[in-house]
Image: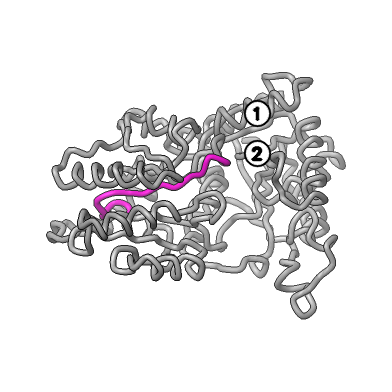
Amino acid sequence: MKNALLIAYHFPPIRVSSGIQRTLSLTRYLHEHGWQPSVLTIAPRAYEKTSDDQLKDVPAHVEVTRAAGWDTARHLAVSGRYLGFMALPDRWVSWLLGGVVSGLRMIRKNKPKVIWSTYPIASAHLIGLVLHRLTGLPWVVDFRDSMTEDNYPSDPTQRKIYRWIESQAVKRASRIIFTTQGACEMYRSRYPEVSADRFAVIPNGYDEEIFLAAERELTDTPKASGPVTLVHSGVLYPSERDPTAFFDALAELKREGAISAGNLKVLLRATGHDSLFQPMLQERSIEDLVSLVPGVSYIEALKEMLSVDGLLLFQAANCNHQVPAKLYEYFRADKPILALTDKQGNTAQTMRDAGLANIVDLQDKQDIKAGLVAFIAQLQAGTAETACPQITRAYSRQALVGNFAGLFDTAVS
């Protein structure tokens, strides 16, 4: 059994939905492939919201070290202000010192054969880089999505630092992982001097064991007659998952008499931006159609996906090379999906690959109106399609972890 050191900012007890599942799945299933993981993460005080509900999913045999670190904006600011360098590359850069010191202790103790770090918190890769340089251990970098774009991060200084971390990671890592082929191809073009076999794609997925637990907790009570219920589960970023055109479409359909609170109920679960969206609902007089509902535990969120009539997905064109992690959970929930996204992006292609055709343009109100009416009609008639079971099974995290283990093996060899 070979040891692996996993570096991840997102880890229980942080309260997020799908953001922690990739790392958590490695702790649960790597041992089935000859690897014993240990986790280096940040102290829970750094998290804005915490929940104990997934601590039980961390196996007892996995060592977890929580290094000292703070959120600059919440812990180190004076009257809400702080110097810019205190949040470079991100607001958790104070984790760097504690992470390196704790990481060196873990390396001396456990003698791992490989270091793995994961984005989207850049300081995690920075810790991985320092530990790699100090120890010479092979480093596997899990970018997931792109770390930089032409206009991301928006602050030029932060973008410059991100690009430096990114370039160091690509230059020095034994393996470089992305969640979509689009992101992988973009980086191959950006760094043509890097051998193509160092790049790999491992998509996000779903945890079958947790889904089975959620299904066991569901009652067999038949759904009462009532409005068609649609849910979006998770954060709605204003710039990457903007629901404005969706709200406009709902308002027009309501005025036209095509929908009403009697036949449609939309739940936006844990948007993270309720204060922004609530006035938008009031301005359009659609509060009776759309409810902004608070976050729940992960297993409760899965139970809701399993219980509603249909699922909503939002993804803007500026994220065309990304696929929301929740899409794979939607596949496993075996419910019809309406995707509001760019039809040329990776999200739309992933939908089509799974045999799903209910895709509308996130920014096109008329397309949303027509697609939503058709989707509701399909749900009412019982003809709406769900993801192909064979495709869905390929996204089981238990199976995907085998791909990580394979990359660890090649990095060591």
> Reading the chain from its start, which is encountered first: label 2 or label 1?
2
Question: Is 382 left or right of 283, judged from the image as shown?
Answer: left
Residues in magenta?
A: 305-318
**Residue at mark 2 to residue at mark 1: CA–CA distance:** 8 Å
Decide if residue 34 is in sight here.
Answer: yes
Q: Among all residues in the image, which is located at the extreme right? A: 134
In percent of width and height, residue 238 lies at: 54, 56
According to the image, label 1 marks what residue? 186
Quarter of the image for residue 294 reads: bottom left
Helix, strand or loop at mark 1: helix
The amino acid pointed to by label 1 is: Met
According to the image, label 2 marks what residue? 146
In percent of width and height, residue 74 lies at: 70, 72
Q: Is residue 103 above or below residue 378?
A: below
The amino acid pointed to by label 2 is: Ser
- Please name whichever residue, 342 or 326, is drawn nearer the observer in this view of the structure: 342
